[in-house]
């Protein structure tokens, strides 16, 4: 019996269980707090690592360093706070014989290559920002930031980012490191509160199935038997995986007009998306992102595998047994009698000396008023501002946090939107080429000086005179905090209003469930 027929058979079971399996997780989702917190989401700027002719090397090197724990081997001090981006290592072994986390065991690099492509197409900045330029950090509607679309811990609950949030939002190396830690965390959840694939060997690509699933949320929406998914989505493949826009992939199925039928993310589960791009690497500018790897997807024709994926087994895991680790969902990935064994990643270890290239030796210097200033908001829309700039006298990326003691005192890009209030920014050393304009003629400069304005928001101010202070705080490398005290005069007739908070938006069940006390919004 072919795979499509097996899927069709189970589809009936899923529909029959629809209320129990699908609707109930949505109810749990509605009970969770909004991912973005009680304040507006943070605004950070970042440096989109240079890419010429589709070059993938920059982000690939960062990922290679992160999976081996070579980016940040020690805790760091940032603006007086201790931040921890250390790679915690991986547990290993099957259920009942699990060994403690070992930092010498790496995450297979190709897995995170593919995750970063699915999440952000290997971009840390908003898609309007050219490669090699400075601009707003890529941010999803549910406050996932950067190339890893990190949502865990990124909620704005105080109005000011902590140092770790700011580093994740500004610097691509910290973003990659945190995304890697989150993926490793999902691996290490087994077997206490997650099932085990195979022998729990982190070298085996097949054994990462549940950890990959968890990165997007261990919800039924990512179950291969979800009723909204077509049982024919894999084309002629033995098990469905995303084509990643490779026209030679079996799942690249077109209709009579040549239009692709199963196009993108909504047509596949998260593991199918990630494994799909591992086998069918994307290309940019004619360059392939990475070398394809071989692996075996779960074979639903095998009873010992099919039983683990019965919807009722997932339902029991979700509602009754997560604290027991969901042993009913364990499935084998090795079949010696059929000469089918798990596969290993083919990416070689990375030279730790490359770390210096992507961290540099930054040192910040700020230029602004040397004493307190007075700014006035007058009728007719006239609002004073004062210029502050940040220069990196060292090398590469110098990130800094921006915080104020009153919501009416804000900082904006001098040459950007005056309604986008910055929580973090960066300066680039002169050794680095920075793109100023990509089209129609490419223009570059050496380094980047962050030019900003300190100004007022009269709608947030009481009438008359108020005083507040703004702080510009280096987060990595050298430099001292610069602060400026501002006396603000609100002479407008605008009544003060509270700092606006976004209306909570419903998030997909894949990002908003609780299993065994673990909130899936912390999954990325």
Image: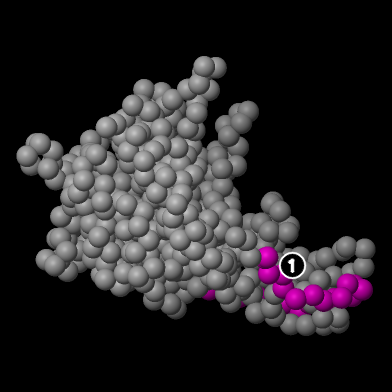
Q: Position of residue 337 (x, y in %)?
A: 6, 39
Q: What residue is disc 1 on?
A: 455
Q: In the picture, which quadrant includes the N terminus?
A: top left
Quarter of the image for residue 321 reads bottom left
227 magenta-colored: no
Identify which residue is drawn at 69% across, 78% down.
406
Q: Against 168, is 31 above or below?
A: below
Q: Position of residue 338 (x, y in %)?
A: 10, 36
Q: In the picture, which quadrant includes the C terminus?
A: bottom left
Identify which residue is drawn at 74% across, 67% down.
455
Q: Nearer the viewer, residue 23 or 322?
A: 23
Q: Position of residue 270 (x, y in %)?
A: 40, 47
Quarter of the image for residue 293 reads top left
Q: Is residue 399 visible?
A: no
475 horizontally vs 188: left or right: right
296 horizontally vs 165: left or right: left
SS majority, magenta: loop
Q: Position of residue 199 (x, y in %)?
A: 15, 55
Colour setting: one colour
Q: Against 198, is 51 above or below?
A: above
Q: Nearer the viewer, residue 63 or 278?
A: 278
Kindly state the secondary structure of the residue where label 1 is placed: strand
Q: Is residue 18 visible?
A: yes
What stretch of residues is rendered in magenta? 481-503
485 magenta-colored: yes
């Amino acid at each position: 019996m072919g795979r499509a027929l097996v899927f069709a058979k189970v589809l009936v079971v899923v529909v029959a269980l629809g209320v129990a399996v699908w609707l109930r997780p949505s109810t749990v989702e509605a009970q969770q707090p909004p991912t973005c917190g009680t304040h507006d989401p943070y605004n950070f700027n970042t440096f989109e690592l240079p890419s010429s002719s589709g070059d993938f090397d920059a982000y690939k090197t960062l990922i290679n360093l992160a999976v081996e724990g070579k980016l940040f081997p020690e805790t760091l001090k940032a603006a007086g706070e201790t931040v921890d981006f250390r790679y915690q290592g991986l547990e290993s072994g099957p259920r009942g014989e699990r060994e403690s986390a070992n930092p010498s065991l790496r995450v297979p690099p190709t897995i995170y290559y593919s995750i970063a492509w699915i999440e952000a197409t290997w971009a840390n900045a908003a898609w309007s920002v050219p490669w090699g330029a400075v601009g707003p950090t890529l941010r999803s509607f549910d406050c996932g930031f950067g190339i890893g679309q990190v949502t865990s811990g990124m909620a704005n609950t105080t109005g000011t980012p902590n140092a770790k949030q700011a580093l994740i939002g500004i610097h691509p190396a910290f973003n990659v490191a945190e995304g890697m830690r989150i993926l490793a965390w999902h691996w290490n959840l087994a077997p206490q509160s997650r099932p085990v694939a195979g022998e729990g060997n982190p070298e085996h690509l097949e054994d990462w199935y549940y950890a990959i699933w968890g990165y997007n949320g261990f919800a039924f929406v990512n179950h291969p038997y979800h009723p909204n998914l077509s049982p024919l989505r894999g084309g002629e493949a033995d098990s469905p995986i995303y084509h990643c826009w490779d026209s030679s992939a079996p799942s690249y199925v077109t209709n009579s007009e040549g239009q692709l039928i199963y196009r993108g993310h909504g047509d596949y589960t998260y593991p199918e998306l990630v494994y799909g791009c591992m086998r069918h690497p994307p290309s940019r500018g004619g360059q392939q992102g990475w070398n394809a790897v071989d692996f075996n997807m779960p074979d639903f024709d095998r009873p010992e595998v099919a039983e683990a994926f019965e919807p009722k087994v997932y339902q029991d895991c979700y509602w009754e047994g997560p604290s027991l680790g969901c042993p009913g969902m364990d499935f084998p990935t090795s079949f010696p009698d059929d000469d089918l064994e798990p596969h290993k990643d083919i990416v070689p270890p990375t030279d730790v000396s490359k770390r210096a290239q992507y961290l540099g030796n930054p040192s910040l210097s700020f230029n602004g008023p040397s004493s307190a200033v007075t700014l006035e908001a007058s009728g007719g829309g006239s609002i004073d501002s004062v210029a502050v700039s940040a220069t990196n006298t060292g090398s590469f990326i110098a990130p800094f946090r921006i915080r104020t003691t009153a919501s009416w005192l804000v900082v904006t890009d001098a040459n950007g939107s005056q309604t986008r209030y910055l929580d973090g920014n960066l300066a680039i050393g002169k050794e680095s080429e920075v793109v100023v304009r990509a089209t129609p003629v490419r223009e570059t400069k050496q380094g980047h000086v962050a030019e900003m304005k300190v100004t007022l928001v009269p709608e947030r101010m009481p009438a008359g005179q108020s005083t507040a202070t703004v702080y510009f705080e280096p987060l990595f490398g050298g430099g001292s905090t610069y602060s400026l005290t501002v006396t603000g005069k609100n002479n407008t007739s605008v009544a003060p209003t509270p700092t606006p908070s976004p209306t909570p938006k419903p998030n997909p069940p894949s990002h908003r469930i609780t299993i065994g006390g673990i909130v899936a919004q912390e999954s990325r």
